[in-house]
Image (cartoon, rainbow, N blue to C red):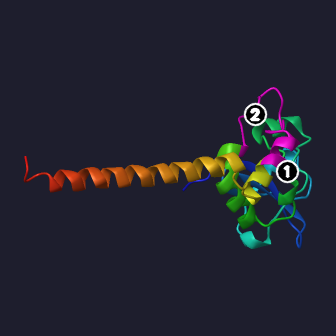
C-alpha cells in the first residue's frame, strides 16, 4: 500500500546534515540549516535509511521554503525515531491523523494536542464494554438460543405431523 504524501525532516547524527522526506523521496541538504539556499543545492540521499532520525523541530522558518514543503506538527513520540519507524507510523495513522492544511497558514498543526492524545490512547488501550453493553449482548445471545429452540420445536412438530397431513 502506498503512503499518503507527506513532508518530514530527518537528520543524520554522525555526519550532521538534514534529509528532507518529500512525499517519499529523500533529499540531502548540504548543511544543517533548512532554508531556500540549502534546498536549491539538495542532492538525492543515497545513504542508509536506518541512519536517519526524525528531527524534533519540523517547523520551517524560511517562508518561501515552507510553501514548497508544508510540514505537520507530528506527535512528540516520533521525535528521534528512525525513518522506518516514521513510515510505519504514517502508514498506520495518516488517513485519520493528517488533514489538509490551509495554504495561508503554513505549518499549521493538523490536530490539536488533546485530540492527538485521545487518538494515541484509543490505539493503545481497548475499552472494556460497559455493564449495559454486556447485558445487551448476553440478552441477545439468550434470545437467539430461545428462537433457535423454538424453530427446532416447530420443525420437529412439523415432521412428526407430516404423515398425518
Is residue 165 visible in the rendered image? The answer is yes
Tell me the crowding category of disc 1: few under 14, some 14 to 19, or many 20 or more residues within 10 angstroms, Cα based.
Answer: some
Q: Range of the magenta residues?
A: 97-118
| Secondary structure mainly formed by the magenta segment | loop
Q: Residue at x 88, y 44 (%)?
A: 60
Q: Is residue 11 above or below residue 155?
A: below
Task: Say if the magenta span includes residue 117.
Answer: yes
Question: Where is residue 62 shown, x and y percent of the image?
Answer: 90, 39
Name the residue that disc number 2 marks. Answer: 101
Name the residue that disc number 1 marks. Answer: 38
Q: Secondary structure at mark 1?
A: helix
Task: Say if the magenta span includes residue 51.
Answer: no
Q: Tell whether 127 sits left or right of 38.
A: left
Q: Secondary structure at mark 2?
A: loop
Disc with the residue nearer the chain's start (1 vs 2): 1
Closer to us: 148 or 10:
148
Amino acid at each position: 500500500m502506498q503512503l499518503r504524501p507527506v513532508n518530514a525532516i530527518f537528520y543524520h547524527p554522525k555526519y550532521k546534515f538534514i534529509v528532507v522526506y518529500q512525499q517519499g523521496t529523500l533529499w540531502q541538504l548540504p548543511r544543517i540549516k533548512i532554508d531556500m539556499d540549502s534546498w536549491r543545492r539538495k542532492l538525492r540521499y543515497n545513504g542508509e535509511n536506518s541512519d536517519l532520525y526524525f528531527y524534533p523541530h519540523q517547523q520551517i522558518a524560511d517562508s518561501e521554503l515552507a510553501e514548497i514543503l508544508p510540514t505537520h506538527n507530528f506527535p512528540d513520540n516520533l521525535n528521534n525515531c528512525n525513518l522506518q519507524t516514521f513510515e510505519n507510523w504514517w502508514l498506520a495513522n495518516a488517513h485519520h491523523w493528517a488533514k489538509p492544511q490551509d495554504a495561508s497558514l503554513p505549518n499549521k498543526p493538523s490536530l490539536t494536542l488533546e485530540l492527538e492524545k485521545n487518538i494515541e490512547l484509543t490505539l493503545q488501550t481497548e475499552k472494556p464494554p460497559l455493564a449495559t453493553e454486556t447485558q445487551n449482548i448476553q440478552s441477545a445471545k439468550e434470545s437467539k438460543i430461545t428462537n433457535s429452540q423454538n424453530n427446532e420445536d416447530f420443525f420437529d412438530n412439523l415432521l412428526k405431523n407430516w404423515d398425518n397431513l
